[in-house]
Amino acid sequence: MKFNYHLKSRNSYTYKAYREYIDVLHAQDKTTGNNHSEAMLAYSKMNVTRMKRLDKTALIRQDLAEVILSLTNQKWLILTEAWCGDAAQNIPWINKMAALNSAIQVQLILRDENTDIMHDYQTNGGNSIPKLIALDEHEQVLFTWGPRPRLMQEKYIQMKNEGIEYADLLKQIHTLYAKDNGTELQAEFYSILK
């Protein structure tokens, strides 16, 4: 399937530029998107802490690294927002994977600025992020991934269906991320890329 969007006319970021942009917004008491409420700012600030930790501690397993090193030119386009906890838990890992191979370019775009792309890459009818769209050098879609590893997604859906309060749901999902330490994400990418 062809990716039918021109990205050159859109704001996009490398991972480093994305992180710097979030820091600039925080200095202005803002986050990405239009909702700069205290809650969204708190999520965004917590996510900066998560990303900093994962930038330092995330290690890519050897078999996955070998598969990544064998890949040819790809662009990993990621829809995200700074306030999204799943993005903060997964994008540092994805960035570390891509950094292993100079043939993989990571490009981040903001969901709320790119609603047309998000609409075409929804998860179960929702605008869930992060959403990764992998493209080859001819802009053909190789695969998509997101918004969270299958283990976390199944737990999220189960708790949502049980009517668990949103704050409790988030706490449990992020606890699961901490215990998992990238295992599920790496297993999924190994299967996808192999």
Image (cartoon, grey):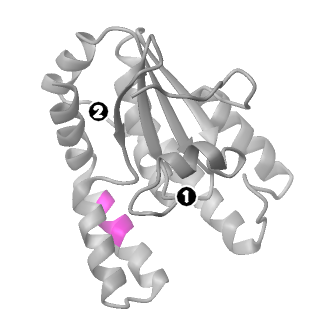
Q: Earlier in the sequence, mark 2 or mark 1?
A: 2
SS under mark 1: loop
**In the rendered view of the protein, which quadrant contains the N terminus?**
top left
In the image, taking residue 64 as reference, residue 16 lies left or right, namely right
Q: Residue at x 55, y 55 (%)?
A: 47
The residue closer to the viewer here, 56 or 144, is: 144
In the image, taking residue 155 as reference, residue 4 lies left or right, namely right
The residue closer to the viewer here, 85 or 133, is: 133
Q: Is residue 36 above or below residue 49?
A: below
Q: Position of residue 92 (x, y in %)?
A: 44, 38
Mark 1 residue type: Cys
Mark 2 residue type: Leu
Instruction: Report the residue marked by disc 2.
Output: 59
Q: Residue at x 39, y 9 (%)?
A: 73
* Magenta span: 173-177
- Marking on residue 84: 1
